[in-house]
Amino acid sequence: LFRESPQGVRLLRRDGRVEGYVSLRRGVNATQIGPCIATPAAGEPLLCDALSLCAGLPVFIDIPCDNAPAVELAERCGLRAQRQFMRMCRGEPVHDQPASIFASSGPEKG
């Protein structure tokens, strides 16, 4: 993702530690925001920064329903749900942390 759009990658550090990151890239129909992986405190400023870079443009962002603060932030910024995805896997289940996933990469990136 960085190679595709290095200008669209943001990293947030506090006290020398990485608290989160966000990436965005221009698509044919809209700018796709994600992934955004962050601590609860870093997720909001990262998403707000990404959204500010897309002011006035169509935007797609895929937020896990389990991350209510991220969903609420997107709704406050004027976005609305259009589609839902179901995560499926074969073999060992994935044990992710939805509270840290403020945006996925999109279905085409995983």
Image (cartoon, rainbow, N blue to C red):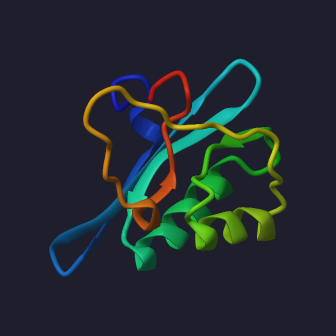
For this orientation, the residue located farthest to the left is: 16
For this orientation, the residue located farthest to the top is: 28
Residue 89 rendering spot, x and y as whole percentages = 40, 30
Quadrant for the C terminus, please: top left
Tell me if residue 81 comes above or below residue 38 in the rendering: above
Image point (42%, 23%), residue name: 4
Nearest to the observer: residue 2 or residue 76 = 76
Quadrant for the N terminus, please: top left
Tell me if residue 33 comes above or below residue 96 in the rendering: above
Image point (71%, 62%), residue name: 74
Image point (53%, 21%), residue name: 108
For this orientation, the residue located farthest to the front is: 91
Please identify the quarter of the rendering in which residue 14 is found. bottom left
Residue 96 rendering spot, x and y as whole percentages = 34, 53
Q: Is residue 72 left or right of residue 80?
A: left
Residue 60 rendering spot, x and y as whole percentages = 70, 39
Nearest to the observer: residue 77 or residue 93 = 93
Residue 11 rendering spot, x and y as whole percentages = 34, 57
Tell me if residue 32 comes above or below residue 28 in the rendering: below
Q: Is residue 38 left or right of residue 19?
A: right
Nearest to the observer: residue 7 or residue 102 = 102
Image point (54%, 71%), residue name: 44
Count of marks placed on residues = 0
Nearest to the observer: residue 35 or residue 107 = 107
Q: Is residue 54 left or right of residue 49?
A: right
Please identify the quarter of the rendering in which residue 84 is found. top right
Please identify the quarter of the rendering in which residue 82 is found. top right
